[in-house]
Amino acid sequence: MKKSVIVFLAFMGMSFTFMSMARNKMVSVKGHINYYGNAPFATAAFKTDDGKILAMEVAPDAKITLKEVLDAQGHYLELNGEMEEAGLSDKPTGAQGKIIIYSYKDISVKGK
């Protein structure tokens, strides 16, 4: 009886471990960088193809900087990262979420 309980608990522990590993929080969103507000207090945000406005932050261990991402304003971008809820301190006010950017790609159509 004790062996079956131990086997059951071990099985449940492994199941929970694999289930938590299966949840990949990485997402990919496409859209453009826009600025919201008035100078000198304008704030950059990412507007997705479906109309959501996302605050942006670069992950500390990413190989890019926020300046590199912002320099791509005017290009059609794909951001890869994790989504979080936007907090009260995230700008612009009213953002529907916040993306922690790990990488980005310029997917603008280029002329031949």
Image (cartoon, grey):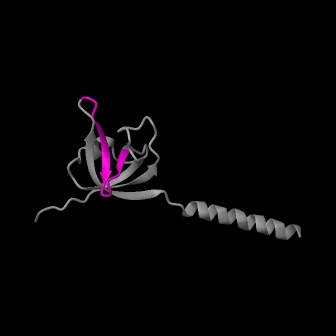
> Which quadrant does the C terminus fall into?
bottom left
> Which quadrant does the N terminus fall into?
bottom right
Which image quadrant is residue 58 in? top left
- In-image side of 27 versus 66 (left or right): right
Q: Residue at x 23, y 47 (%)?
A: 73
Residue 52 position, x and y percent, is: 35, 51
Q: Which residues are magenta?
A: 40-55
Q: Residue at x 35, y 53 (%)?
A: 103
- In-image side of 16 versus 77 (left or right): right
Residue at the right extreme of this rendering: 1
Residue at the left extreme of this rendering: 112
Q: Residue at x 74, y 65 (%)?
A: 10
Q: Residue at x 32, y 42 (%)?
A: 66
Check the image and report above or below for 56 versus 40. Answer: below
Does the magenta-highlighted stretch encompass residue 17?
A: no
Residue 110 position, x and y percent, is: 15, 61
Check the image and report above or below for 35 versus 78. Answer: above
Residue 84 position, x and y percent, is: 46, 48
In the rendered picture of this protein, how many numbered marks are placed on residues? 0
- In-image side of 86 versus 78 (left or right): right
Which image quadrant is residue 15 in? bottom right
Residue 28 position, x and y percent, is: 38, 59
Does the magenta-highlighted stretch encompass residue 46?
A: yes
